[in-house]
Amino acid sequence: MNQQIIIRPLITEKSMQTIQKGAYVFEVVRTASKHQIEQAINTLFGVAVQQVRTVYLHGKQKRVGKRRQIITTAGRKKAFVTLLPGQKIDLFPSAPKEQTT
C-alpha cells in the first residue's frame, strides 16, 4: 500500500537544492494525508521524518484537436518531506561493481 501512496520522487533543479537542506520532494496520490505519506516514507526508505508539507497543483487547460477544444489535465499533489538531521534518502543508488578476475 505504501508504494501506491508515493508515485515518484520529483527530480528537478529546485528539488535538488532542497535535498541539500534535508527536504525531499515526492509526487503522491491526491487523496493521501500527511500521516499516510510519513508512514510510507518510513517503511519504504527506513528514515525518520520530521515534517511533511503538501501542496495541490490544479490541472492546466489545454487546447487539443482540429477544433481546438479545451480539456483540463489532471491535478497533482506534491509532498515536501523533511528528514531528521543525519537522515538521508539515496534517490540514485549506485549499481554494484562487477568483479573482474
Image: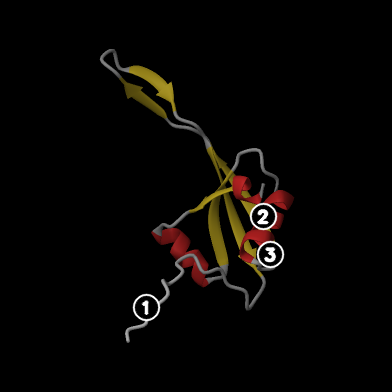
Residue holding disc 2: 40
Q: Position of residue 53 (x, y in %)?
A: 64, 54
Q: Quadrant of residue 38?
A: bottom right
Q: Is mark 1 on a helix, strand or loop?
A: loop
Q: Position of residue 82 (x, y in %)?
A: 62, 64
For marks 2 and 1 on the same chain, the one whose residue lies earlier in the sequence? 2
Q: In which quarter of the image is residue 42?
A: bottom right
Q: What residue is shown at x 65% (from left), y 50% (from top)? A: 2
Residue 98, disc? 1
Q: Position of residue 44 (x, y in %)?
A: 63, 60
Q: Nearer the viewer, mark 1 or mark 3?
A: 1
- Quarter holding the C terminus is bottom left
Residue at the extreme right? 35
Q: In which quarter of the image is residue 39?
A: bottom right
Residue sitting nearer the eye, 63 or 86:
86
Residue holding disc 3: 49
Residue sitting nearer the eye, 71 or 2:
2
Q: Which amino acid does label 3 sit on?
A: Val
Q: Residues within 10 Å of mark 3 (few under 14, many from 20)?
A: some
Q: Which amino acid does label 1 sit on?
A: Glu
